[in-house]
Amino acid sequence: MLKKKMPIGIDDFADIMTQGFYYVDKTGMIKELLENWGKVNLFTRPRRFGKSMNMSMLKYFFEIGTNKSLFDGLEISRETALCEEYMGQFPVISVSLKQVSGVSFEEAKTQLWSVITEAAEELDHLQDSKVLNARDKRKIFDLSEGNGNQQEGLRLMSRMLYKHYGKKTIILIDEYDAPLQKAQENGYYGDMVKLIRQLFGYALKSNEALYFSVLTGCMRVSKESIFSDLNNPDTHTMLDPQFGEWFGFTDVEVQQMLRAYNLQDYYQITKDWYDGYCMGKTQNIYCPWDVIKWCKALEADRDAVPENYWANVSENNIVYQFVEMADETTRFDLETLSEGHCVDKSISMELTYKDIGASIDNLWSVLFTTGYLTQRGRNEDGTYKLAIPNKEVRSIFHQQIKKWILTKIEVGLQVLYEAMDRGKAEEIQQQINSCLKESVSFMDGGNTVEQKESFYHGLLLGLVKGRRGWVVKSNREAGDGRADIILIDRIKNTGIIIEVKYAVESSVLKDMAQEGLRQIESRKYDEYFLGYDLGNISKYGIAFYKRKCMFEKK
């Protein structure tokens, strides 16, 4: 029997079920939604946690004329009475605002209009309606042509569907807050707030044609900005106990998926890298995108190593902004997090995008809502125990902190390079220490000396790669081993060998730096330069301990 295909980049439920893709059954969400729904239902989860797939699932379940066989054998099919009453019984309008991302308000407004127009085009069958009059049909046609009142588009479509079918409409809006994020980044937030508020106000409040609606997004944008024209939506965030298992993969689901592809031996490494989220009271939630990409990599190569898949599809500038704003207290908190412990913080689930950078307290909340942190329980004072969920997210922090460090010392890089040209170990040490003093010991994160050395190795590599005229090699075979960093200055015809060490305490920094030098000598790393005819070769043992470093030269 052929294994099912990995659904990478596939978020259409019908495609998953008919084209041989692996599907983690989340149809139980339908029952919970119907048993607990309100008029307006909002689900907030980080990106790549299955929101779009679930919205597609809802569309195919409720939509009139659906292919009911799509749900054969799935969890919801066991609810026969519920399926009889609800499956294929409602007109559905389904839109995604993910692509509304213009650099100007006019461009974004045009993109939003395209979303409404495309939704109207799907109602061409109403032109043959025996119920709608000529005026009704003209309104739908005009909307599909890009004419009419954009803000009233969703309400108009729902009214026409209600009139035609005699059944109220379900409206699904995926990534509802994406236009607001882009608007904040590009300076037209106020205008976009007004537009989205009008669109939602018309469609979701006092709309007699609406049965219910579901919205998804990353953040619960505050009532004062978006939902001011609505009654309170029934909001389900990562803190709420309901719907905890429907977004993201549970531990059981991940184990089942690994077995399906004969990858069960990789369970622990999968868990270490991609598990760790808590949704309400549901523990051990994995990011689906990560698990699927990782399984795909393992299928191709059983020697594959875990990668940071989520960082490639998520906006990580928030981490950089957080580190940039960090004061001494926050730096201590970051150190605590890096050591695998929790920090106690208040979390606000109702922020506006314009308020994100107003204070470090807001950034804690955003790091939580966007998936960079998770919660491990609540304290008596109402604060939450926040933690870094897994190795993947920890690596994101490391990357952004390194980026911040390099930005901080960019002006001083020339001084560093000149010190290396002159072979002045004390000056090199001083330049890097001036940077480390302002950074955080979180940056040496990792549970082992090897992981810590790897981080500092990467930091140094980033520094020296900025020098024009230097050829930089990392972990290159040399002599009887692998040298951490090898530099060749083609302009000055010189070479440098650097061996990086991590000291378990400050008192042994010098000893570890000298150990680095001894390793260079004993393993004959300088043999790498045989045949280069260099005028001079410098050897550095470099040891780090949190915000300190020490250089030894030969």
Image: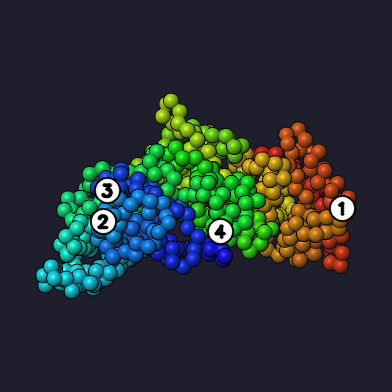
User: Do tag 2 and tag 3 residues touch (Cβ < 8 Å)?
Assistant: no
What percent of the width, then of the height, locates residue 243? 39, 44
- The image's mark for residue 523 is 1
Which quadrant of the rendered structure holds the N terminus? bottom right
Examine the image and state in which quarter residue 166 appears: bottom left
Task: Report, in whole angstroms, how far the alpha carbon at label 4 lies from the one at label 1.
Answer: 39 Å
Q: List the residue tagged with mark 2.
A: 170
Tally the numbered discs: 4
User: Do tag 4 and tag 1 residues touch (Cβ < 8 Å)?
Assistant: no
- For marks 1 and 3, the one nearer the N-term is 3
The residue sitting at 20% across, 50% down in the picture is 205
Task: Report, in whole angstroms, how far the alpha carbon at label 2 lies from the one at label 3.
Answer: 10 Å
Is disc 1 placed on a helix, strand or loop?
loop
- From the viewer's perspective, is the residue at label 1 or at label 3 nearer? 3
Residue type, mark 3 in image: Val
Q: List the residue tagged with mark 4.
A: 293
Residue 381 to residue 174: above or below:
above
Residue nearest the observer in this picture, 494 or 55 = 55
Residue nearest the observer in this picture, 51 or 176 = 51
- The image's mark for residue 40 is 3
Residue type, mark 4 in image: Lys
- For marks 1 and 2, the one nearer the N-term is 2
User: Is disc 2 surrounded by few (<14), some (14 to 19) or many (20+) residues within 10 Å?
Assistant: many
User: Do tag 1 and tag 3 residues touch (Cβ < 8 Å)?
Assistant: no
